[in-house]
């Protein structure tokens, strides 16, 4: 751990690492299993170089732990509470979609009545 980093720096690093759909998909893929990069590639339909870049960013942020077994590089989530964070984000998005759909429904009803 870098002793010069503030708690806010470390929080920003974690949140920044989550700011890409492919990295969120990687984390979700590792929710129940330890997987190697060779399993993640076809699962996520990513090129090796692209996958490696995302895995490295997640590892640098402390979200993933990796280790080698022969030619395989295995990955697992370092702290399962990251799923709580993603679950909260998912609930926020679902609520926003629900609110948007309600606005559209109200608008459509209003528009239909006016005509």
Image: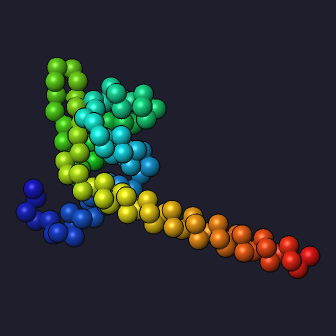
Kindly give the residue lying farthest to the right in the view shown: 115
The front one of 53 and 89 is 89
Quadrant in the picture for residue 30:
top left
11 displayed left or right of 89: left
Image spot of residue 44 (x, y percent)? 43, 35
Kindly give the residue lying farthest to the left in the view shown: 3
x 44%, y 63%: residue: 91
Q: How many marks can you see?
A: 0
Image spot of residue 10 (x, y percent)? 20, 63
The front one of 112 and 39 is 112
Image spot of residue 53 (x, y percent)? 33, 40
Determine if residue 54 is in view. Answer: no
Determine if residue 63 is in view. Answer: yes
100 displayed left or right of 18: right
Quadrant in the picture for residue 113:
bottom right
Quarter of the picture holding the N terminus: bottom left
x 43%, y 59%: residue: 90
Image spot of residue 98 (x, y percent)? 58, 66
Classify 26 as above or below 80: above
The front one of 63 and 31 is 31
x 51%, y 67%: residue: 95
């Amino acid at each position: 751990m870098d002793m010069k980093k503030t708690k806010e720096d470390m929080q920003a690093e974690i949140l920044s690492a989550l700011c890409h759909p492919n990295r969120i998909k990687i984390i979700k893929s590792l929710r129940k299993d330890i997987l190697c990069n060779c399993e993640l590639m076809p699962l996520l339909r990513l090129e090796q170089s692209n996958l490696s870049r995302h895995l490295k960013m997640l590892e640098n942020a402390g979200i993933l732990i990796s280790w080698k077994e022969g030619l395989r590089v295995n990955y697992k989530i370092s702290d399962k509470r990251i799923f709580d964070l993603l679950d909260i984000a998912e609930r926020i998005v679902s609520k926003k979609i629900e609110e948007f759909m309600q606005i559209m429904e109200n608008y459509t009803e209003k528009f239909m009545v006016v005509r």
